[in-house]
Amino acid sequence: METGVGARIGVDIGGTFTDLVLSDGLGRTWFHKHASTPAQPERAVLTGIVDILQRADLRPDDLVEVLHGTTVGSNTLLQQNGARTGLITTKGFRDVLEIGRVRTPDMFDLQWNKPAPLVPRRLRREVTERIAADGSVVTPLDEDELCAVGADLMAAGVESIAICFINSFRNPDHERRADALLRQRLPGLAITASVNVLAEMREYERTSTAVVNAYVLPILQSYLQRLSDGLLAIGVHAPLLVGDSNGGLAAARTAQEKPVFFISSGRSAGVVGAARLGRVAGEEDIVVFDMGGTTASASLVQGGEISRANEYEFRAGISTPARFIKAGGYMMRVPTVDVAEVGSGGGSIAWIDDGGLLHVGPVSAGADPGPACYGLGGERATVSDANVVLGYLPGDLAGGGLHLDIDKARMVIERDLARPMNLSLEAAAFGVREVANANMARAIRAVSVERGIDPRDFTLAAFGGSGPVHACDLARSLDITRVMLPMMPGVFTALGMLTGDVERHFLTAMPGPLNDLNTAALEVAVTALRGQAEAALREENFTTEQMSYAFSLELRFEGQDSELPILLPDALDQVSLSWLRQQFLATYEAIYQYAADDAVEVVNLRLLARGARPGKLDFRDVSIADTDTPLRVAGGRKVYFGRGHGWLQTAVLDRRAFSGAAVGPMILESADSTVVVPPEGRVRGDGLGNLLIELTGETE
């Protein structure tokens, strides 16, 4: 076979499988699912790369890029196994992390407990220094005290230190000096200065962001170094790019320096890919739904534009960067795709509480030992086990690489759920499915109904290994009548990375009344940020023609706590104070349905700089290369479609052989995922490799 030109690999690590997609630069793609290795995530990545290169008959040196979405950062926060971290701050501000935003996520929840700070109080130390709000030095930095505090923290076993001084966003001299001194005196420690990750006002947000960065820094650094070394060992010399929380890509060294920007790495790439696919397919209003082995997430694409936010709180239960829900998690003030996530996935464990109620998740069986039906030692009933019992899943997953033990699935559902609840086997299994669907509907409502947006006006785009199995039932529960299942849905997040660009984020604080904004000073700040961005992108070998810049000025009403970004035109001579105020009022009213006639403040100038990757994947030119697995012969099996339909004999087809249109019930199987078309659902291909399903009738 002729070797491809400019081959690229996208890799996404999930809780159960590590997904890989290879594009050879001519539009031909191969995909592969490999069991994840949670203890050493890089092992699955490296083994998967070797396997997929062999299948495509390509050599390691044919690769020009490896694109990677990693869950190492989010798992570190979830499992609370980050570095032992210390915090050095201005005298009098030791308890900023404890105080937070002085609010709760739900004012009526009397049982809510605030998450423990990532840095315990005994490891939070103060030093003598003070910068005034205008940037002037009130009290010089006591360097001897700083070095003594740093040595004391190191003696206490600290591996990483965050530095956050009050008003350092106005004058970073003290923080930068402290950073340099500690690196010189304590070379074994990882150091994070807040101005290097978030040079803006608000001491709590800046402190929390710096602490999260410090907490995750040694873990992600070690992982990416092991992965880079492993790539070289298998002969891959291509650059490693890592997906960030905003859906872009950045060099691995950037992720190693500022991991807080990469906490939500993998899931954002799927949203960006879905938005790009939607524009090609003529679907610009999309609810993006991704269900994997451990979690399910939802996001919104409206008018082809992705919903984004500038902060994100990582917390148990449902995580969302919603504008209206504050506190309750670990705050990261970083650009991110606006995604709501719940702990419901194919591997989520079903259990009964002391009151006899059925729950699903958030604990997952993961890849080790996995669901009981995997036959790898799992003994707990999961969503996948329920789907096996109900007939939704085939006998083999991952292209035949995993044979499912149907009898084991039936046994654990019967033992753990059906008997204790005095239900039939199928009723218990279907109950697991319904509870999981209800959990996942929460995530979709969080990004739609709770934002004043009606999801019935949108198309549900579902992917992930388990997404197409649940998509139609989930859509019906929300009265969504149109479902889009993209090409290669089970590995779509990895595919989405291949369509991305490199992004770098820059910010300068410009606090003050809008009426006092000096447009000449704005031009100076724009020029300075553009210079920083251009230098950073040139380091990654982008030409001037490949660079693009999007500046936004963040404004708010005087006295408010949150701001809204106003995109600036390319020609700054079009910007006036009256134009900025008009744009802000229109944006505010579009979100909150009203706008006051109050004074407006400027907060920050923000720059999103992009480097357009040459050879990135275009959905209009994608073709799935022939796989080693032969086409499955059309057949059928009995599938349980709820209390209203019961068990129905259902046609089962190989998705590659499906064309035209059909009416369900029907199951379309492929090596990466299984598509369930319910009774009365009308399915057809759209000519781009996607499936569109129109839903009518009732759920049951």
Image (spheres, rainbow, N blue to C red):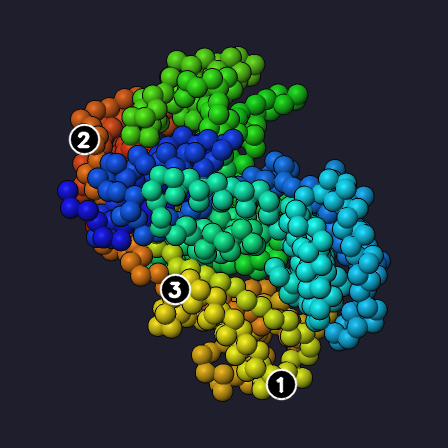
Please state which of residues 480 and 468 is positioned toward the viewer in this rendering.
468
Secondary structure state at the residue bearing disc 2:
loop
The amino acid type found where label 1 is placed reads Asn
- Between the residue at mark 2 and the residue at mark 1, the CA separation in whole angstroms equals 67 Å
Please state which of residues 523 and 83 is positioned toward the viewer in this rendering.
83
Q: How many labels does the image show?
A: 3
Split into 4 quadrants, where in the image is the C terminus? top left
Q: Could you tell me which residue is drawn at 21 percent across and 32 percent down? A: 628
The reply to whether discs 3 and 2 touch (Cβ–Cβ < 8 Å) is: no
Disc number at residue 541?
A: 3
Q: In which quadrant of the rendered view does residue 548 lie?
A: bottom left
Q: Could you tell me which residue is drawn at 66 percent across and 21 percent down? A: 354
Q: Which of marks 3 and 2 is in front?
A: 3
According to the image, label 1 marks what residue? 518
- Is residue 686 visible in the rendered image? The answer is no
Q: Could you tell me which residue is drawn at 32 percent across and 26 percent down? A: 401
Among the two numbered marks 3 and 2 on one chain, the one whose residue lies closer to the N terminus: 3
- Between the residue at mark 3 and the residue at mark 2, the CA separation in whole angstroms equals 43 Å
The crowding category of the residue bearing disc 3, from other C-alpha atoms within 10 Å (few below 14, some 14 to 19, many at least 20), is few
Above or below, 433 against 225 in this view is above
Above or below, 572 against 316 in this view is below
According to the image, label 2 marks what residue? 631
Q: Position of residue 219 (x, y in %)?
A: 58, 42
The amino acid type found where label 2 is placed reads Leu
Q: Position of residue 446 (x, y in %)?
A: 55, 49
- Between the residue at mark 3 and the residue at mark 1, the CA separation in whole angstroms equals 35 Å
Among the two numbered marks 3 and 1 on one chain, the one whose residue lies closer to the N terminus: 1
Q: Nearer the viewer, mark 3 or mark 1?
A: 3
Split into 4 quadrants, where in the image is the N terminus? top left
The amino acid type found where label 3 is placed reads Asn
